[in-house]
Amino acid sequence: MILTTTNSIEGFKIADYLGIVTGVAINDQTLASGFSTSKYYKKIQESIDTVKEKAFQNIQENAKKLGANAIVGIKVEIELTTTNYPVVSVTGTAVKVLV
């Protein structure tokens, strides 16, 4: 599947716009306490990376359900809850491109 933040894909023609798709993921596992500040931030970054990957997997699954082979206009939002759980939301437009 082609994923892009742009609204078009160079060298490809979008044949059909199938709808907006979203992938959301949260890491609700407690981040270990007792870390030094640098280790704590590293742990949060690792958690965000993991959650972001899950969100991208979710958006691709949702796009495939619509018959898409690409997602354009992707936007990624990353938030930390008040308890420092990372939440990642990925939104884009599922499209069918001619290959």
Image: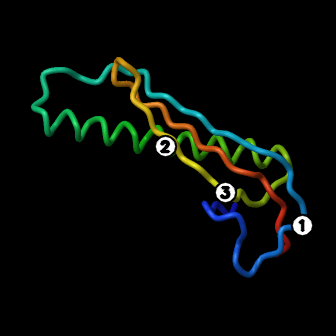
Viewer-nearest residue: 66 or 75? 75
Residue 60 location, x and y as percent?
68, 48
Q: Residues within 10 Å of mark 2 (few under 14, many from 20)?
A: many
- Label 3: element kind: strand
Specify the label residue 73 is tagged with: 3
Residue at the spot 86% in from the left edge and 56% down from the top edge: 17
Q: Is residue 72 left or right of residue 97?
A: left
Q: Is residue 91 left or right of residue 67?
A: left
Residue at the spot 56% in from the left edge and 38% down from the top edge: 89
The nearer-to-camera label among 3 and 1 is 3
Q: Is residue 12 left or right of residue 39?
A: right
Specify the label residue 52 is tagged with: 2
Say what amino acid the circle numbered 1 marks: Ala
- Label 1: element kind: strand
The nearer-to-camera label among 1 and 2 is 1
- Label 2: element kind: helix
Earlier-in-chain disc, 1 versus 2: 1
Residue at the spot 31% in from the left edge and 42% down from the top edge: 45
* Quarter location, residue 98: bottom right
> How many labels, in total?
3
* Quarter location, residue 8: bottom right
Residue 43 location, x and y as percent?
26, 36
Q: CA distance from mark 1 to mark 2?
A: 28 Å
Residue 21 location, x and y as percent?
73, 43
Marks 2/3 in contact by CB < 8 Å: the verdict is no
Specify the label residue 15 is tagged with: 1
Say what amino acid the circle numbered 3 marks: Gly
